[in-house]
Image (cartoon, rainbow, N blue to C red):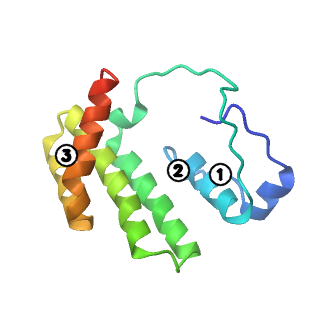
Amino acid sequence: NNPSVVIDRECFDRVGLFDEKMFFAADWDMWLRIAEKYEIKYIAQPLSKYRLIRDYRQAHPGEAEADYLSVLAKVWARNPGLSGRLKRQALSEVYTDMFYVNFRNRKTVAAARSALALFLTDPGRSAALIGARFKRKKEENF
């Protein structure tokens, strides 16, 4: 959610505008491109309120996963020196999230595909990530 963002026009001139081909991850893609060129500051206090609505990813998990993986591919293309460990961690997070979304939607084949991709990406983290995600979602009353 981006309701409290102030950005100079020069920033968009330098990094480009939102990728209009993306629906789910256009903001994430933009933030990563900005962070590659500028210092990002974080204010640790609420500056706005927002409401939660049904997660749109749940209705379109395949498109969401494609967008997330596209963002990562673009980051890696722009930054070829990133470590394999960081790449595995990023992919693990995407596959864990998509596993959960598909599992919650009772899309068992898609959930199994995400779980397999997670395991093949980082076997050591796969069980821990899925377990932590379920615990966190349970605590959030999902």
Q: Which residue is mark 3?
A: 111
* Mark 2 vs mark 3, CA separation in Å: 22 Å
Kind of residue at disc 2: Met
Residue at the spot x=53%, y=67% of the render?
74
* Mark 1 vs mark 2, CA separation in Å: 8 Å
Query: Considering only vertical position in the picture, is 92 above or below 80?
Result: above
Residue at the spot x=68%, y=43% of the render?
42
Q: Quadrant of the N terminus?
A: top right
Q: Which residue is mark 2?
A: 22
* Figure label count: 3
Pinpoint residue 48: horizontal percent, then vertical percent. 67, 23
Q: Quadrant of the C terminus?
A: top left
Pinpoint residue 16: horizontal percent, then vertical percent. 72, 59
* Mark 3 vs mark 1, CA separation in Å: 30 Å
Within 10 Å of disc 2 (Cα), the crowding (few <14, some 14-19, many 20+) is: some
Kind of residue at disc 3: Ala
Determine whether the residue tagged by mark 3 lies in a helix, strand or loop. Answer: helix
Query: Considering only vertical position in the picture, is 142 above or below 136?
Result: above
Label 2 vs 3, first from the N-terminus: 2
For the residue pair 17 and 7, the one nearer the viewer reads as 7
Kind of residue at disc 1: Phe
Q: Are marks 1 and 2 in contact (CB under 8 Å)?
A: yes
